[in-house]
């Protein structure tokens, strides 16, 4: 009998990807400690004892760091959306390696090796230009792997354990696991939902920050998030915020009219599937029930004023916004367990704040559910002896591109070990690759007079 998802959340053991963006060749991010030398922990041991809760990925600009995070995001989005939104598309979304003809025509493969309810699972799929080429799910209830289902993309049939309820046929552009979530399949549904509930990603770009701040504002206004929690999170960063509130202003009539038009357009694009229609109608109800107001966060800072002024979010620093956008989802993952992926974790944040956040995940006295943090960074301070975070070689990864534009993912543990070596210094000197091959002298040609540039072949 398949087990249900436990409260501790998903634990990722390893992730494998082939032919995604610059990751042309097979790349594997392994979060297992060397102590896990068997398929499962020995009696009396827990999975959390043998899995790293922090993994750091370093590399030059455009070396493929973000491609790995994006590959993880793609795999989870395929599980979430392939049975619903993807069905409305003409082709299955995919981003294979684009710098050679063979890769563009080849399938892309994604494999998640993970733990749910203390049971190890492996889920994988391959996707090509015609849709899903292959899909499988297996678990490890005992000492041997067991196949839960397999699926060949050339057929709509999903071959499942005889004891399991049939899933029925699937289309070429949807994952069977995504269909199982949509249909609330009694055995597969909990596994799919457990994966999705255990994954959170935070790209620290401006658009994402705006969405995150909007979600925080609405959660505070609805009461699902506590104001005191936000103040505490701000105090951790020593930002000087003493109070947080939500200000509401009425929308102008033309904005209300525009919202009504948007609702009508959304209603016209509802899915034809009954389940999807049911879910979409809930979204529509929430939209209809929204007040015609605009909400914004306001902050009161520590000051000597008798009546401290309130500052809108627009007047706060990039660092304050970055911290708030990052620490709120991190808190949720720490409370419930799961995997938290952050691209460019050091964007607009001081090294000590980055170290504080990483420390929460690294400290088992704080991280009770073995929540995991996978992040990319340029900040070599995290690798230096000065850093308060001690990362083992197996927790440090580098990305580097070869002369064909393909990314290679390399673990620090694969290099010869030197006792008390300054990893940051070695990294910056190019010992591990993953540093930019700059050509600063080229700027001299661009600073020459225009007529000289034309003679030497330099143009704008």
Image (cartoon, helix red, strand yellow):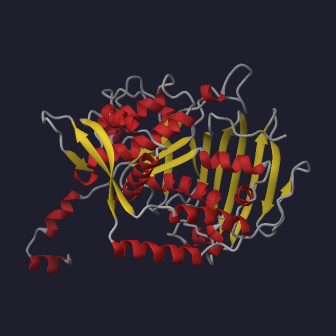
Q: Residue furthest top?
A: 44
Residue 35 lies, in percent from the top left, at 62, 26
- The answer to whether residue 446 is visible is yes
> Horizontal placement of 140 versus 293: left or right?
right
Residue depicted at 63% across the width and 58% down the height: 80
Q: The C terminus is located in which quarter?
A: bottom left
Residue 435 lies, in percent from the top left, at 35, 49
- The answer to whether residue 399 is visible is no
Q: Residue furthest right?
A: 162
Q: Is residue 73 above or below residue 457?
A: above
Residue 147 lies, in percent from the top left, at 82, 47
> Horizontal placement of 30 versus 259: left or right?
right
Q: Is residue 279 above or below residue 409?
A: below
- In the image, 23 versus 120, the foreground residue is 120
Q: Residue furthest left?
A: 449
Q: The N terminus is located in which quarter?
A: top right
> Horizontal placement of 171 versus 53: left or right?
right
Residue depicted at 71% across the width and 59% down the height: 182
Quarter where residue 75 is shown: bottom right
- In the image, 453 versus 41, the foreground residue is 41
Q: Is residue 369 above or below residue 454?
A: above
Residue 145 lies, in percent from the top left, at 80, 40
> Horizontal placement of 75 versus 412: left or right?
right
All told, the count of numbered labels is 0
Residue depicted at 33% across the width and 39% down the height: 380
């Amino acid at each position: 009998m398949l087990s249900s998802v436990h409260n501790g959340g998903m634990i990722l053991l390893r992730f494998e990807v082939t032919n995604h963006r610059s990751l042309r060749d097979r790349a594997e991010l392994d979060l297992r400690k060397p102590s896990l030398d068997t398929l499962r922990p020995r009696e009396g041991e827990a999975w959390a004892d043998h899995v790293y809760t922090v993994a750091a990925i370093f590399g030059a600009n455009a070396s493929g760091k973000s491609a790995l995070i994006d590959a993880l995001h793609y795999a989870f989005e395929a599980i979430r959306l392939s049975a619903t939104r993807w069905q409305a598309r003409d082709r299955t979304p995919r981003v294979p390696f684009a710098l050679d003809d063979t890769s563009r025509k080849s399938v892309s493969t994604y494999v998640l090796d993970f733990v749910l309810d203390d049971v190890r699972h492996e889920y994988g799929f391959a996707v090509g230009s015609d849709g899903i080429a292959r899909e499988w799910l297996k678990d490890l209830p005992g000492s041997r792997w067991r196949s839960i289902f397999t699926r060949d993309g050339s057929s709509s049939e999903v071959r499942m354990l005889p004891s399991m309820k049939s899933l029925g046929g699937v289309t070429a552009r949807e994952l069977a696991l995504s269909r199982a979530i949509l249909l609330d399949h009694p055995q597969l549904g909990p596994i799919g939902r457990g994966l999705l509930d255990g994954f959170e990603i935070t790209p620290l770009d401006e658009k994402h920050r705006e969405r995150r701040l909007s979600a925080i504002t609405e959660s505070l206004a609805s009461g699902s998030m506590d104001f005191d929690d936000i103040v505490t999170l701000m105090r951790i960063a020593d930002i000087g915020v003493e109070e947080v509130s939500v200000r509401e202003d009425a929308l102008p009539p033309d904005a209300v009219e525009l919202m009504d038009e948007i609702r009508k357009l959304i209603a016209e694009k509802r899915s034809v599937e009954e389940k999807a229609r049911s879910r979409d109608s809930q979204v529509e109800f929430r939209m209809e029930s929204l007040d015609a107001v605009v909400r914004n966060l306001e902050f009161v800072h520590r000051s000597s004023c008798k009546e401290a002024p309130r500052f809108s979010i627009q007047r706060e620093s990039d660092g304050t916004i970055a911290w708030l956008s990052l620490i709120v989802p991190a808190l949720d993952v720490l409370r419930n367990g799961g995997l938290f992926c952050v691209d460019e974790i050091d964007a607009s944040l001081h090294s000590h704040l980055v170290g504080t956040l990483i420390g929460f995940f690294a400290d088992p006295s704080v991280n009770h559910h073995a929540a995991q943090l996978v992040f990319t960074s340029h900040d070599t301070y995290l690798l230096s002896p000065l850093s308060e975070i001690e990362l083992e070689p197996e927790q440090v990864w580098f990305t580097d591109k070869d002369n064909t534009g393909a990314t290679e993912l390399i673990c620090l543990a694969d290099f010869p070990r030197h006792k008390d070596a300054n990893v940051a210094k070695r990294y910056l000197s190019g010992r591990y690759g993953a540093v930019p091959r700059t050509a600063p002298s080229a700027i001299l040609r661009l600073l020459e007079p225009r007529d000289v540039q034309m003679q030497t072949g330099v143009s704008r």
